[in-house]
Image: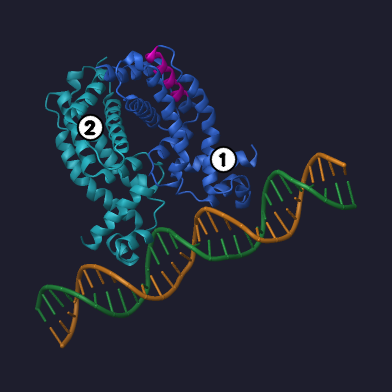
Chain colours: A cyan, B blue, C green, D orange
Amino acid sequence: MDNREMILETALDLFYARGYDAVGVQEIAERSGVTKPTLYYYFKSKYGLLEQLLEGRGEAFMERLHRACTYEGDLRNTLCTAAGELVSFAEKEPKFYALFLALYHSARENEAYQAVRPLVLRLQQEVEQIFVSAAGLLGNMRGRQRQFSLGFIGLILFDIKMRLETSGGLRLTVSQEEINSLVHQFMHGIYS
Amino acid sequence: MDNREMILETALDLFYARGYDAVGVQEIAERSGVTKPTLYYYFKSKYGLLEQLLEGRGEAFMERLHRACTYEGDLRNTLCTAAGELVSFAEKEPKFYALFLALYHSARENEAYQAVRPLVLRLQQEVEQIFVSAAGLLGNMRGRQRQFSLGFIGLILFDIKMRLETSGGLRLTVSQEEINSLVHQFMHGIYS
DNA sequence: GACACAGTATACCGAACGGTATAGAATGAA
DNA sequence: TTCATTCTATACCGTTCGGTATACTGTGTC
């Protein structure tokens, strides 16, 4: 692993454990086995480091999520696919997932929240797209696509987080059945 | 409002807006119209300030929640009461509610998370107690009281948060019907 | 008046913060 | 060999961090 990759990895570990603001650039550099100028050579600022971390780790995920969110006539199926994608991402990158969730809920006027906004917006758009496409099926949604998608995201994200925590640390296994059950739970609320 | 109360109010504003770690003691003191030693006279450290803020604002709420979570034979009813209590709290103290939620999701090894843990645990215990009491009614829960309570909390908390955000800022109004609908959505997932 | 005590301000501490000027090493191309 | 480019380290910058030693002011008690 080269220095740049090493710095990103260390930053993820530390931001995940203690939060963006509570971690100093000094410590990231030291734990990466480099000095500060090296860090600033690759990332022009602490904020830039966070940006590149989120961008790099989030990009591949977003592409796969985009494909998973393509509606093809069956809402339940699409939601299951999307939920499965979120789950498998959390399985592969538990630390990044936890960091993302923490930033997602962090203070609005904080630097770190600004950095995660692009990812948040894309996630919301992808999921909302499902409900927009399924509008005909669901009947009159009266513009509630947003509310539905936010509810869906909240349910899945929080559920994954809780499973991550209950499993002690960073192991996570969610069966297809459990995903189906979650989606079922969500959908009934809408139809009723 | 005396100085102590003024400091607490200012701290809530700033922590809410930018997060615990991103706000300096200096700024809290200045915006409160006092100097640092005054702040340290009332709260022996920055962490102590956060603790007292959470304790003071959270105590009354927890007591009311405790009463709301007392199971009296009707699970749906009890869940609606508990959800209603959470909602009415978020209506009255939107900033504190948002801060609580941010800390709830913040990094585990961060000071701020340690400070909010007591509140988090009590909230979880209160809600879990509902499901423990209702165990007979629900049939064999196989120790899933925890999972149910966490799912319930996640659903309600996230829903409120989203309503707060969608409503632009700090206004929130949730009708009894909407609460009933949420609880209904939650329960069907369990029974199915 | 003398005293105690709660509350506040001036002025300061060492440490850590994010960030940088500068120079040296390593590498490959000409 | 020379040169440019990429990467890295030494040593430093001004600022802010959380926190405090000390002394002063008000107020009520005796």
- Can residue A19 be spotted in the picture? no
Q: Determine the chain carrying the residue at label 2.
A: A
Circle 1 residues within 10 Å: few <14, some 14–19, many ≥20: many
B80 up-or-down from C15: above or below:
above
Circle 2 residues within 10 Å: few <14, some 14–19, many ≥20: many
B43 up-or-down from A85: above or below:
below
Q: What element carries label 1?
A: helix
Q: Residue at x 53, y 31 (%)?
A: B59
Residue on which the image places disc 2: A127
Q: Where residue A180 sits in the image (x, y, percent)?
A: 19, 25
Q: Where residue A72 sits in the image (x, y, percent)?
A: 11, 27
- Comparing A98 with B133, the one in front is B133
Q: Which part of the image, by quadrant, shows the C terminus of chain B?
A: top left
Q: Where residue B117 sits in the image (x, y, percent)?
A: 44, 38
Q: Is disc 2 in the same subunit as disc 1? A: no
Q: Callout 2, which amino acid?
A: Val
Q: Which part of the image, by quadrant, shows the N terminus of chain B?
A: top right
Q: Callout 1, which amino acid?
A: Leu
Q: Where residue B93 sits in the image (x, y, percent)?
A: 50, 30
Q: What stretch is highlighted in magenta?
A: B74-88
In the rendered structure, find residue B8 and report the number of the disc placed on it: 1
Q: Is residue B80 magenta?
A: yes
Q: Which image quadrant for residue D30? A: top right
Q: Is residue B72 left or right of residue A48?
A: right
Q: What element carries label 2?
A: helix
